[in-house]
Amino acid sequence: MTGDRIGVDESGKGDYFGPLVIAACYVDPSMDAELDGVKDSKKLTDALALKLDPVIRRVCPFAVVRVDPPKYNELYEKIKNLNRLLAWGHAQAIENVLAKVDCELVISDQFADPAFLKRTLQTKEKGKHVRLESRVRAESDLAVAAASVVARAEFLRRLKSLGEGVGMDLPKGAGTPVDDAARRIVRNQGREVLPTVAKMHFKTTQKVLGGLF
């Protein structure tokens, strides 16, 4: 893809522990050489994503919207819809980049309700003027790939920090290791600690608390 554009992507959506992070990055053709090696964060190791993150932040105008678990749980309780929460975060990240640089084209991954993202952008001062393209496998575009790396690196750093706060490593994703970690947190520190590190609407919550209380 040639031309200037803003890419937007998220990390942490499918992870029980840790924040939801949305990042947006502006890319133009003059940046291609400096962004060599940047690709969809799902195709990178965690170590490489963390290594590429400062390069992207140096080269690209960017914005990060990080929603830590307490705020995430509060917003989800109000909105009751993950796609609307994602649209809010995407729109805010895009608007924050547009405050730094003028750009007419925004590319996002095609999550379940791109029409809602378009409507949300219409409520923004600058976002209402952009052309939004929601694509399947949007991470093949360099701008979206850069945003995915920045979002992933921010998620990884914050997950590590939250783990240090509760004295244990917090596993990524969902599944048995995550269930086991959640049970240890509740047993050792109390169920009130769980919402400070986890997304409580996941089925993991009922699985863990139902088996303990």
Image: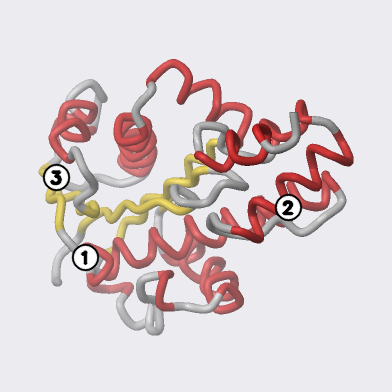
Q: Position of residue 190 (x, y in %)?
A: 83, 31
Residue at coordinates 30% horizontally, 35% vertically from top-left? 83
| Residue 165: quarter of image | top right
Graded by Cα atoms within 10 Å as few (under 14), some (14 to 19) or many (20 or more), the crowding at tag 1 reads: few
Which residue position is annotated with label 1? Answer: 137
Question: Circle 2 sits in a helix, a strand or a loop, which is it?
Answer: helix
Task: Confirm or deny contact between disc 1 and disc 2 (CB under 8 A).
Answer: no
Q: Amino acid at mark 2?
A: Ala
Q: Amino acid at mark 3?
A: Leu
User: In front: mark 2 or mark 3?
Assistant: 2
Question: Circle 3 sits in a helix, a strand or a loop, which is it?
Answer: strand
Q: CA distance from mark 2 to mark 3?
A: 40 Å
Whether residue 46 is visible to the viewer of this picture, yes or no, is yes
Q: Is residue 21 above or below residue 99?
A: below
Residue at coordinates 34% horizontally, 83% vertically from top-left? 33
Task: Confirm or deny contact between disc 1 and disc 3 (CB under 8 A).
Answer: no
Q: CA distance from mark 1 to mark 2?
A: 32 Å
From the viewer's side, name the closer residue of 191 and 31.
Answer: 191
Question: Circle 1 sits in a helix, a strand or a loop, which is it?
Answer: loop
Which callout, 2 or 3, points at the residue further toward the start of the chain? 3
Which callout, 1 or 2, points at the residue further toward the start of the chain? 1
Left or right of 34 on screen, residue 169: right
From the viewer's side, name the closer residue of 16 and 99.
Answer: 16
Q: Position of residue 32 (x, y in %)?
A: 30, 77
Graded by Cα atoms within 10 Å as few (under 14), some (14 to 19) or many (20 or more), the crowding at tag 2 reads: some
Q: Position of residue 45 (x, y in %)?
A: 53, 78
Q: Position of residue 71 (x, y in %)?
A: 57, 27
| Residue 26: quarter of image | bottom left
For residue 181, which numbered disc appears in the image?
A: 2
Which residue position is annotated with label 3? Answer: 132
From the viewer's side, name the closer residue of 63 and 120.
Answer: 120
Graded by Cα atoms within 10 Å as few (under 14), some (14 to 19) or many (20 or more), the crowding at tag 3 reads: many
